[in-house]
């Protein structure tokens, strides 16, 4: 079946796409979600629901359902770190039962990076195998072992990529594998260096990848120099240039630094719009969803 989500329609129509992020909180207070419904409904076509990305939060599936019922189209994130193929297929069928139409297939950060070093990981399958599994469920209506599913199953399939991973030849090869496995859209890690982004996009264009998948560039407004340094030290896949950190520092106090971080993010969005082969942006909120309409207004999107 063909996915019937708003995001799927945007991709098919060739529109410039904006997605954003919601990070489920640690707890069961639905008032927290309710407080962000208005913010999340102002602009993004769909909203990623993080799956225990930086720590233990409420279920991505449950939170996706709550947002969906509030009129916000979710992108249900699912990671292979915490589930074997039995649980993955079960959760995916449950998501379809509950009306979820988009899924982002990830391996997930190692548990030591999200505050749970004593936890065992699973990694029964990797993200590329997960993509292929969802594609099989979509196209054949069957599970990995061939079991026939009853009823419709249709998910728009997404994957992640990091433009800064070297060597670039292997980077491109891995993305190609994800596209062939079933990815229809790709959201990148946060980008701060446009020159390196352009080199990566050109490599993808040469392989014809940009014609086959919608690439959404990750944009993360930095709130301060301390946040920038902490992210760079903790997550090696986040490349933040020294010059950018110095620019934020030169802005002044924390309020001024936050405004400068938003300005830089808006500048990145404007540059992304002019790069051939890119289809949109994905705004990382870092748990501060209130910045989403702010940066969209600054970037005039």
Image (cartoon, rainbow, N blue to C red):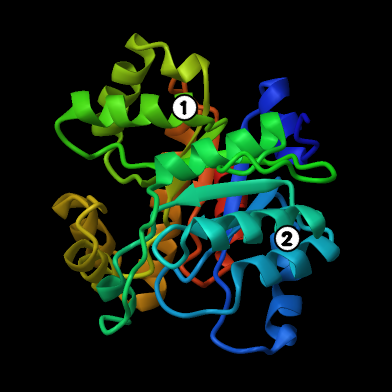
As helix, strand or loop, the secondary structure at mark 1 comes to: helix
Left or right of 59 on screen, residue 125: left
**Res 35 quadrant in image:** bottom right
Say which residue appears at 33% left-offset and 69% top-offset: 121
How far from the left and from the top, in percent, is residue 42? Answer: 74, 56
Quick one: label 2, few (<14), some, or many (20+) residues within 10 Å?
few
Q: Which mark lies nearer to you, 1 or 2?
A: 2
How far from the left and from the top, in percent, is residue 111? Answer: 31, 72
Q: Is residue 122 above or below residue 17?
A: below
**Res 162 quadrant in image:** top left
As helix, strand or loop, the secondary structure at mark 2 comes to: helix
Q: Is residue 256 above or below residue 143?
A: below
Which residue carries the number 1 mark?
179
Say which residue appears at 51% left-offset and 29% top-offset: 273
| Along the line of sight, the residue nearer the viewer: 94 or 59 | 94
Say which residue appears at 65% left-offset and 39% top-offset: 137
The answer to whether mark 1 and mark 2 are in CB contact below 8 A is: no
How far from the left and from the top, in percent, is residue 95? Answer: 72, 58
| Along the line of sight, the residue nearer the viewer: 194 or 201 | 201
């Amino acid at each position: 079946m063909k996915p019937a989500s708003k995001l799927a329609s945007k991709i098919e129509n060739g529109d410039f796409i904006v997605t954003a992020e919601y990070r489920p909180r640690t707890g069961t207070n639905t008032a927290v979600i309710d407080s962000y419904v208005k913010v999340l409904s102002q602009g993004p076509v769909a909203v990623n629901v993080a799956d225990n990305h930086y720590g233990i939060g409420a279920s991505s599936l449950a939170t996706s359902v709550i947002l969906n019922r509030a009129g916000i189209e979710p992108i249900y994130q699912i990671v292979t770190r915490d589930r074997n193929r039995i649980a993955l297929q079960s959760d995916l069928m449950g998501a379809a039962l509950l009306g979820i139409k988009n899924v982002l297939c990830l391996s997930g950060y190692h548990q030591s990076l999200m505050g749970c070093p004593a936890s065992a990981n699973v990694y029964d399958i990797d993200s590329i195998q997960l993509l292929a599994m969802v594609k099989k469920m979509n196209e054949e209506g069957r599970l990995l072992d061939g079991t026939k599913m009853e009823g419709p199953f249709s998910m728009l399939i997404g994957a992640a990529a990091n433009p800064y991973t070297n060597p670039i030849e292997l980077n491109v090869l891995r993305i190609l594998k994800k596209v062939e496995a079933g990815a229809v859209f790709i959201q990148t890690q946060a980008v701060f260096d446009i020159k390196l982004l352009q080199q990566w996009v050109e490599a993808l264009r040469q392989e014809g990848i940009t014609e086959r998948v919608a690439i959404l560039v990750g944009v993360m407004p930095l709130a301060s120099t301390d946040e920038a340094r902490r992210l760079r030290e903790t997550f090696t896949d986040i490349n933040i240039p020294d010059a950018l950190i110095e620019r934020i520092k030169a802005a002044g106090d924390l309020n001024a630094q936050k405004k400068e971080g938003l300005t830089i993010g808006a500048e990145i969005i404007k540059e992304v719009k002019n790069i051939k082969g890119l289809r949109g942006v994905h705004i990382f909120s870092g748990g501060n969803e209130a910045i989403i309409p702010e940066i969209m207004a600054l970037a005039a999107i």
